[in-house]
Amino acid sequence: MDNMKKVRYGVVGLGNMGVPHARHIVEDKNRQFCLTAVCDLAGEKAAKVSEELKVPSFTDACAMYDSGLIDAVIIAVPHYAHGPLAVHAARRGIHVLCEKPLSSSVSHARAMIAECRKRKVKLGVVLQHRTFARNIEARRLVRSGALGEIFRVQMVCSNWFRSQGYYDSGAWRGTWDGEGGGVLINQAPHSLDQFQWIGLGLPKQITSFLATREHKIEVEDTANIFCDYGDGRHGYIYATTAEEPGMDQIIVSGDKATMIVEHQGIRLGKLKIPVAKHIYGTKKQDVIVSAFGGPKQQTTWTDVKIPDRGNRTQHIEIIRGFTKEILTGKGSYACGEGALNELEISNAAYLSGYLGKPISLPVDGAEMDRLLAKLEKERSTGRGQGARKKYYAEMKKLLAKK
């Protein structure tokens, strides 16, 4: 490792996520990467972080890209601006690590992936919940066959409570012309990713019901999503920012066991007899003497021992993994293609919820873009100041220049 090149990082967007990313890089003292530049449209903010972390600052991302100071960039601006910043970086040979979600729309996310592939640069996404020991073990159990054939995956993510003050704190929050969505596009991407990453992957079809239950916002604060995998298996997702106390739970049911993932633990209920065998193996005399059609199944519940991964900061784990991906070609927790699935689910949910019909996946990106434009036109109060439209227009112009 000592002879390997050190990856020089720049950070664009010095807000709630960008500054911690920059500090993590500096504080980690990792010999494989370092912080060499920061950028924010607000000059005072950029100068302040520059002084703290002793690196040059910029107010224009492309100027930072052209400076020769960085090999990779962490994009930590609102998601509607991710596309143009990623494309500009890729066209300059700079690797891109992007905050979640990749974009508001799968069409832009796919364009980002295609551009990075074309320019032979890496694209990663900050989905740090993939680094949690609990989630890694849950995924391993499903893939090891410990649960047998999977029947059902269910997720409840109601631990994303947000006050009205939160939404009022930024003009772009809770708006169609800013965020381009609500809980599904902002708070729940980590949960949607875990649903598909631990469970059964991408569904074949989604039907959803969306609501603005409590908050005074333009977009949804609650979502119910029903997933059909096309082979008799199903899934369900419930997400909200309007519920307390919150819950973060995944249930995966198979013919050999049921797994409950919540808090920092995993409970596994192992069946003595697989479900199919129990259904057809019950004797007639047992049915007669039982009030419920047969003898009760024997289930043994245990707390799964989760391997100790040490005292790790999840965000720096993502940066370490992405650095390894750049240097060796393997190590990223979430590449661009892998991160696309959660956006496919949220986009399908928006289309289903507002068009009132089941939506097949992969999603029609053009149809999603038309829906966003329609919702912005019909439901926007102007609070988001047209931010999404501005960056979408820039992305369209960029992609036309192939």
Image (tube, rainbow, N blue to C red):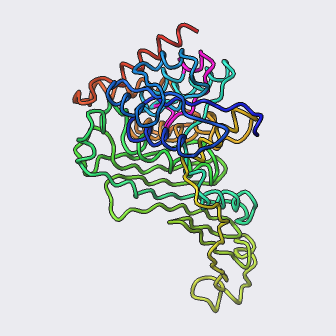
- Magenta stretch, residue numbers: 87-103
Question: What is the x, y in percent for residue 14?
Answer: 40, 34
Q: Quadrant of the C terminus?
A: top right
Closer to us: 331 or 299:
331
Question: What is the x, y in percent for residue 386?
Answer: 30, 23
Answer above or below: position of 342 versus 244: above
Residue at 64% over, 78% down: 302
Any part of residue 368 in sight = no
Answer above or below: position of 226 versus 8: below
Closer to us: 363 or 108:
108
Q: Quadrant of residue 91?
A: top right
Question: What is the x, y in percent for residue 46?
Answer: 38, 28
Q: Quadrant of the N terminus?
A: top right
Question: Quick check: 261 left or right of 210?
Answer: right
Answer above or below: position of 186 versus 286: above
Residue at 47% over, 60% down: 248
Q: Quadrant of residue 199?
A: bottom right
Any part of residue 163 in sight = yes
Question: Quick check: 90 left or right of 372?
Answer: right
Tell me if residue 27 is in the magenta stretch.
no
Question: Quick check: 392 left or right of 199?
Answer: left
User: How many numbered marks have been drawn onto this rendered protein structure?
Assistant: 0
Closer to us: 16 or 247:
16
Closer to us: 118 or 142:
118
Tell me if residue 89 is in the magenta stretch.
yes
Answer above or below: position of 99 versus 373: below
Question: What is the x, y in percent for residue 363?
Answer: 54, 32
Residue lying at the far bottom in this picture: please name it: 289
